[in-house]
Amino acid sequence: MIEAFAFEFFRSAIIAGLLASVICGIIGSYVYVRHMISVAGGISHAAFGGIGLGYLLGADPLAGALWFTLGVAALIWGLVERAKEHIDTLIGAFWAGGMAFGILCLSLTPGYTPDLFSYLFGNILLVAPGHLVMMTLLGAFVLLLFLIFYPVLQALAFDAEYAGISNLPVRGLHLMILALIAVSVVVLIQVVGIILVIALLTLPAAIARPFSKTLRGMMIGATLISMFLTTCGIFLSWIFDIPSGSTIILLGVTVYLLVLGGSNISRSCMKDIQNSDF
């Protein structure tokens, strides 16, 4: 395995995985605590519409995905307060509509139809140096933002109503988080793809949750877990010559199920002890 580091693309993949872990660990923890998984899923799948639009207009597909997902995030933000009872239906509409719009745009694109496998499932082994710079800047921005606004974001994450009563800028912060999710999705498309990005955002946070007492601890734990998953996934994909994005996610699912099973066994044992005569 050590000989793999002789290749620049492999070193770039490891760095990309570590940077993605910082982004996913921080934003994913907030998404998990706020129960925004369906919202993040809607935004991530809507990115496909931006990719298709980019190809149709002859522009950079990732640039098209960025502006399209930012627009979707803004629409979700504007509709959340006005249609709370229908929010799941609206998210589903963005989820399916974005994918359908992307397919329509690609069908109307003249000439050669691009291979969309890398956009749907990612290929971290093909991350370009420019993309690493983008991920570094985003990771630093996310880290700085959460360090500055952590007390406010913590209040918003656990009790949004109290945060609103306390005159905190709830709507503005919510828009900021949605925009960060949109940007993160576009940046992470290269790593695991549109289909799997929601899992990378939520699985590490879900694994870290039982071992965390605070949001900060959960973010740190999720970041470290994500680093473990991405690094091991890249090595496994190298050894067995299998897709890296799918390997990372399947490894995450396996670890999550093990943690979930261990937690259930632990709770069952505690109940048995409490109900015993000793």
Image (cartoon, rainbow, N blue to C red):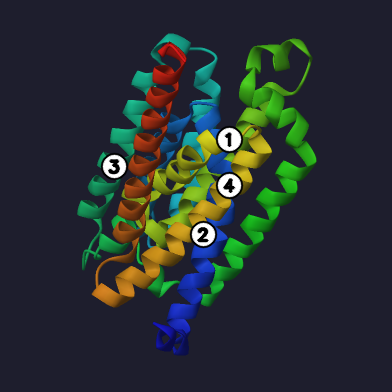
Residue at (32, 27) in percent of width and height: 93
In three-dimensional space, the C-alpha distance between marks 4 and 1, rounded to whole angstroms, equals 13 Å
Q: In this view, does 181 lie above or below 130?
A: above
Looking at the rendered structure, the secondary structure element under dot 1 is: helix
From mark 3 to mark 2, how far is it between C-alphas? 29 Å
Q: Quadrant of residue 44?
A: top left
How crowded is the residue under tag 1: few (<14 C-alpha within 10 Å), some, or many (20+)? many
Q: Name the residue under label 1.
A: 30
Q: Earlier in the sequence, mark 3 or mark 2?
A: 3
Residue 226 coordinates in the image, percent (x, y): 49, 54
N-terminal of the two: label 4 or label 3? 3
Q: Where is residue 5 in the image (x, y as percent from the top left)?
A: 46, 85
Number of numbered callouts drawn: 4
| Label 3 vs label 2, nearer the camera | 2
What kind of element bears circle 3?
Answer: helix
Q: Which of 171 and 21 is in front in this view?
A: 21
How far apart are the two marked residues, 1 and 2, measured between alpha carbons? Answer: 18 Å
Circle 4 — which element?
A: helix
Q: Nearer the viewer, residue 227 or 173?
A: 227
Q: How far apart are marks 1 and 3 (CA)?
A: 25 Å
Pointer 3: residues within 10 angstroms few (<14), some, or many (20+)? many
Q: Are marks 3 and 2 in contact (CB under 8 Å)?
A: no
Residue appearing at x 37%, y 20% in the figure: 88
Residue corresponding to mark 3: 99
Question: Quarter of the image holding residue 273?
Answer: top left
Q: Which amino acid does label 1 sit on?
A: Tyr
Res. 192 visible in picture: yes
Label 2 residue SS: helix
Residue that badge 4 annotates: 221
Question: Closer to the camera, 50 or 138?
Answer: 138
Q: What residue type is labelled 2?
A: Met
